Each structure stands twice: as C-alpha cells, then as structure tokens.
Image (tube, rainbow, N blue to C red):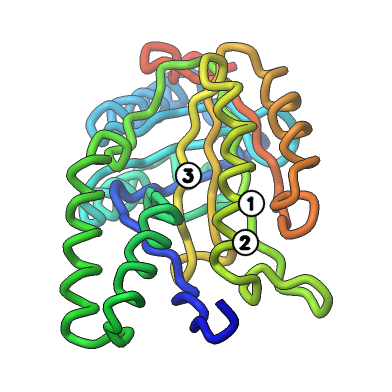
Amino acid sequence: MPNEMPLHAVPLTIEGSWMLHLFWRLDRARWAELDRQKQEEIAQQFADACCDTGAQVFSIIGHKADLLILLVDESLEEVREAELKLRKLAMSAYVSVPYSYFSVVELGLYESSLKTYRALGEQGVAPHSEAWDKAIGETLERQREAMAPRLSAEIPASPYICFYPMDRLRGEDKNWYTVPIEERARMMHEHGLVGRRYAGQVKQIISGSIGLDDWEWGVDLFADDPAVFKRLIYEMRFDEVSAVYAKFGQFFVGKRVPNEKVVSILLG
C-alpha cells in the first residue's frame, strides 16, 4: 500500500557457541635448533593441551599458516581460558600468529523477522516500545528452542575445512544495509537454496563477528572432498546476494590433524 510504513530494517539473530580461529606459523629455523628429545617434549605438551581444551587442529595448505587451532565452546570464558593455556605453552615461543578470527555462531532470522514485524505493524505497535520488546523477546525465545542444535557448534568429523571471513558491501553505489528488509530476505532465501543443494556434501557453520572482529561474518565449511569447496562457492558467486553485495577475505583450507598425529606433524 502506498502509505504503508517500511518494516524495521534490522533482522533478528540468535547466537550460540563462541569460536576462535588461531592460525599458527612455525618458526622452522628456531625449531630446528632444538634437539629431537626437546621437540618431542614440547610437541607432546601441545598435543596434551589440545586434548584438554577440546581444540581442533588442522594443517593449513599453502603459505598463510601452518596450523589452524579451532576453539569452540558455549562459554566465552572457556574459549578465553583455552587460548591463554595455549599461549603459556613452550610451543608458543616457536610460533607466530599471522591471523586469528573471533566470532559467535549466528542464525539470521529473516523469515521470522518479517512475520513478527508485519504483525506488530498491523497492531500499531511502535518499534522499541514495551509491547514491541516483549513480542521480540518471545520470538527470539521460540527460535532459540527450535534451533538449539544448530546453535551449539559441534565440529564435523570431515577431514577438510575451508574458512573465510566476509562482509556485506557498503559501497557508494551498492549498499546492503540500505536495501529494504523484504529484498534482503528474498536474496538470502535464494542464496540459501544454493547451499541446500550441497547439503549432503558440505556442512557449514556461520558465525557473526560484527563488533567482535574486523569482518562481519566467518564461514566454516567441512567436507570429505575439498574440491566441493570450489564448486559450492563458485556457484554461489552467481546469485544476487554474492554477485552484488559480498566481499570476501582470505580463504584458508586445511586438513584435520587427529590428536594422535599432532606430535608427528610437528616433528615433520
């Protein structure tokens, strides 16, 4: 209708587990100065700490890093304690951290947001009024209960990982944050349809980092076949939300290092 007020612009979100991606690069020259026994001792201490903290370790392909240490927990304090424990290890003297990424598992609720905002608008409820906040709180609580399994980030056992950070464009010509929420919801729905076609081949975890890190979202993809990362992301580049509004950071691809092999990979 011509006099209809625009819907509230901000989509609702619910948050779950905290995530910290730590990328380590081994100082091979300094490491090589140690005798074999000392290397084994330090590497075993690191492997034990990974077991104790629940850290997932991946060997990164290429020059960007040697290892990805992935820390995930529903408690931010537990993630922080795990990071501090790793920093105190003797191993930390022989590595640098070329990159890290801090975020929280996030589910964007475009469909629920539109439904709730429309209903409140029809009732004449003013945004951010007491009645508004109560209705929003009830919607979020229902969604948290319904999506609880997806909020707890259990890392899949797949051998390969692909991680990358991303933003939505805020350019002079195209700006995601000025597009009406109905249009953003439509584009996100179409974007999601591409991902669903790969449901049997890739598992993903989307985490939000607005206000937490330099990018807005982090994407973790897990698969048995790393070639599927290329196929999925290439196909997604052709949908509107990616082709027009997406900005991507560096991509990191790695292979899982089982706990029993952490020592051997450090010893070469």
Mark sitting earlier along the chain (3/2): 2
Specify few, some or many for label 3: CA neighbours under 10 Å numbering under 14, 14-19, or 20 or more: many
CA separation in Å, label 3 and label 1:
17 Å
Element class at badge 2: helix
Which is more foreground, mark 3 or mark 1?
Answer: 1
Is 148 located above or below residue 10 in the figure? Answer: above
Instruction: Please name the residue that numbered disc 1 is placed on.
Output: 187
Q: Amino acid at mark 3?
A: Ile
- The C terminus lies in quadrant: top right
Number of the label disc, if any, that sits on residue 217: none
The answer to whether residue 267 is visible is no
Contact between marks 3 and 2 (CB within 8 A): the answer is no
Q: Check residue 183 in the rendering and tell me which mark sits there, or answer none.
A: 2
- The kind of residue tagged 1 is Met
Q: Position of residue 195 (x, y in %)?
A: 59, 31
The image position of residue 77, as x and y in percent, is 21, 56
Q: Mark 1 or mark 3, which is nearer the start of the sequence?
A: 1
Pick whichever, 110 or 256, lies toward us. Answer: 110
Crowdedness of circle 2 by 10 Å Cα count: few (<14), some, many (20+)? Answer: few
Q: Which residue corresponds to mark 3?
A: 206
Is disc 1 surrounded by few (<14), some (14 to 19) or many (20+) residues within 10 Å? Answer: some
* Residue occupying image coordinates x 83% and y 76%: 173
User: Is 80 left, or right, of 104 in this rendering?
Assistant: left
Is label 1 in contact with label 2 (beta carbons under 8 Å)? Answer: yes
SS at circle 3:
strand
Residue depicted at x 51% and y 81%:
4
Residue 238 visible to an observer of this rendering: yes
